[in-house]
Image: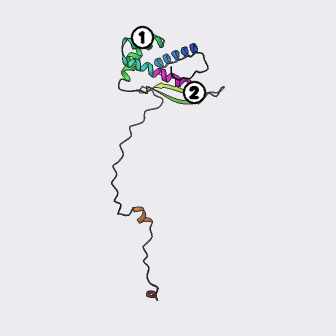
Amino acid sequence: MGKFRKLGRDYSHRLSLLRTMVSQLVKHERIETTLAKAKEVRRKADQMVQLGKEGTEHAARRAAAFVRGDDVVHKLFTELAYRYRDRAGGYTRMLRTKIRTGDASTMAYIEFVDRENELREPKPATPPPRQRVPLDPWTKSRASQQWAGPRITKTSESDGL
């Protein structure tokens, strides 16, 4: 088992908390919780969506053993699996919202990406950079021509007298 946050709870309470939060996230597609819990829920929610994308009977039984409710399992294997069929990972997003009064805990929304009514719209695709003309090292730059004063040639002092 890898590293994880204990969230100030023993094993059974932590497992129950994560199962409930992942089920509610799949059901409602957005929940607000503390930042530490959201980071742990993100890991498990991404695993459940990955199981939904597999689509096998074994994956369905593994998902059903973790999430609560048959409607949640059905949504994982139909709607979410279809929505993320071309995405390799990163099915959830976290957005920090506020500092909770009382205990000053950082709150965050965790939501699925690529859905209707998102809190943050996806960024537009960046256009490719313009092709630059290669510089000729033997020509002077415009800046040096603009800021350089007029060229003064030295004349001998005897010419002026």
Q: Classify residue 78 as left or right of residue 99.
A: left
Q: Position of residue 131 (x, y in %)?
A: 33, 49
Tag 2's secondary structure? strand
Please name whichever residue, 31 or 131, is drawn nearer the observer in this view of the structure: 131
From the image, state whether disc 1 or disc 2 is nearer to you. Answer: 1
Whether 36 is among the magenta residues is yes
Q: Earlier in the sequence, mark 1 or mark 2?
A: 1
Please name whichever residue, 50 or 26, is drawn nearer the observer in this view of the structure: 50
Amino acid type at circle 2 is Met
Label 1 Cα crowd, 10 Å radius (few <14 / some 14-19 / many 20+):
few
Query: Quick one: which residue is furthest to the front in this view?
Result: 1
Residue visible at 49% across and 18% down in the picture: 22
Q: Classify residue 70 as left or right of residue 108.
A: left
Q: Position of residue 126 (x, y in %)?
A: 39, 40
Q: Gap in Å between the C-alphas at discs 1 and 2?
A: 33 Å
Residue 125 in which image quadrant: top left
Name the residue carrying label 1: 61
Which portion, as a residue range, is magenta?
Answer: 33-45
Q: Is residue 76 visible?
A: yes
Name the residue carrying label 2: 107
